[in-house]
Every structure is written in C-alpha cells, then in structure tokens.
Image: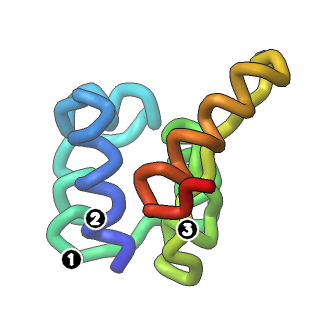
Amino acid sequence: MICDRIKLLREKSGMTQSELSRKLGITRSGVNAWEMGLSIPSTQYVVELALLFNVSTDYLLGLNSTATVSVAGLQDREIAAIVELINCLKGNTK
C-alpha cells in the first residue's frame, strides 16, 4: 500500500515527517495521515514523492514491486559494477 511505501522511503532517506512535510509544502499531520492510511496523496503529491525519492509512481502506488535506481551521471564501468552487485545479491553470478 502507498502508506507503507511512503513511510519506508521517508525512513530510508533519514527524513522525519516534519522534514518531508516542509519539502512538500504541507503539514506534518498530512504526511502522518498518509502513512497511517487515513488519507492518500493527490496525484500532484504522488508525482512529487516519486521524484523526491527517485522511484516510479507505479512503485509508490504498489503497482510494481520493482524499485528503480537512477544511474544518471555514472560511467559505464560504474553501472556495470552496480549490475554485477545486484546479480550477486540475487544469486545470479556467472
């Protein structure tokens, strides 16, 4: 559910509810309501959250369980190292 993903992403980013609310220009209680499942963010905030946490809106909404990682600005050898690490963690080593 979106409430769980918002909380997880916020905590992984080391942000408090207050810090997230300031970045989005809403109240802390608004963020708290999202995380408790009492309300859901509008489309505008779903997009802002996805951009802020560098995930897709599909991931945030629970439509896709695959999180994405931006490799923008990395060199080919750095991307290859990340892919190798992911494959190793998945047990897909060659």
Residue 38 x, y percent position in the rendering = 21, 77
Disc 3 or 1, which lies upstream in sequence?
Answer: 1
Callout 1 touching callout 2 (CB < 8 Å): yes
Q: Which residue is mark 2?
A: 34
Instruction: Say which element carries label 2.
Output: helix
Give the residue at x 62% y 72%.
58
Callout 3 touching callout 1 (CB < 8 Å): no
**63, 44: nearer the viewer:** 63
Instruction: Say which element carries label 1.
Output: loop
Give the image quarter of residue 24.
top left
Q: Which residue is mark 1?
A: 38
Visible residue check, residue 30? no
Visible residue check, residue 11? yes
Callout 3: 10 Å neighbours few (<14), some, many (20+)?
few
Q: Which mark is residue 66?
A: 3
Callout 1: 10 Å neighbours few (<14), some, many (20+)?
few
